[in-house]
Amino acid sequence: MLTALALAAALQAPASAEAPATSALEGDWTVDLSVDPAQPYTRPMHLNLAADGTVTGMFYQSDIEAGRWKRQHGRLCVSFRTTDGAGPYHTAACAVGDHVEGQTWAEHRNFVFVWNAVR
């Protein structure tokens, strides 16, 4: 079991060299929500990752609400909520090399979108 001192030291340890910088997710992205490759369907995403762990920006032309980011296990990921006015959309995504892999769940619309995004 970790002592409080060991736990505090572990939490303050610098990120590993394998962990991507926040720039791996920040900025403008084109999200591919296509279900049929013959019918492309893309929407914009803009992510701002703040030092306090919050995420702001825009996804699918809606402002990001209650967004958070975390770097752990060599991955950099975000989670956030947006809305279409009828209900919430919950999104989770991670940087994977030069792209983003994510999913968005809309319970009120009864769907999950699995998507990729590129710069």
Image: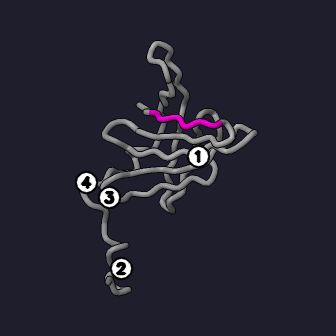
Question: What residue is shown at x 48% (from left), y 55% (from top)?
Answer: 69
Q: Which residue is mark 2?
A: 7
Question: What residue is shown at x 71% (from left), y 43% (from top)?
Answer: 87
Q: Which residue is mark 4?
A: 18
Give yes or no for contact between labels 2 and 3 (Cβ–Cβ under 8 Å).
Answer: no
Q: Disc 1 or 3, which lies upstream in sequence?
A: 3
The dot on residue 34 is: none
* Residue 34 in picture, x, y percent from top left: 50, 23
What secondary structure predominates along the stretch shown in magenta? strand
User: Badge 1 local density, few (<14 within 10 Å), some, or many (20+)?
Assistant: some
Q: Which residue is mark 1?
A: 90
The dot on residue 73 is: 3
Question: What residue is shown at x 30% (from left), y 55% (from top)?
Answer: 74
Q: Specify the farthest residue to the left.
A: 17
In this view, the residue in front, 103 or 10, is 103
For the residues labelled 1 and 3, the Cα–Cα distance comes to: 22 Å
Secondary structure type for disc 2: helix
For the residues labelled 1 and 4, the Cα–Cα distance comes to: 28 Å
Classify 87 as above or below 9. Answer: above
Amino acid type at image mark 4: Glu
Quarter containing the N terminus: bottom left
For discs 3 and 4, the disc positioned in front in the rendered view: 3
Classify 86 as above or below 80. Answer: above
For discs 1 and 4, the disc positioned in front in the rendered view: 1
Secondary structure type for disc 4: loop
Q: Disc 2 or 3, which lies upstream in sequence?
A: 2
**Residues rendered magenta in the picture:** 110-115
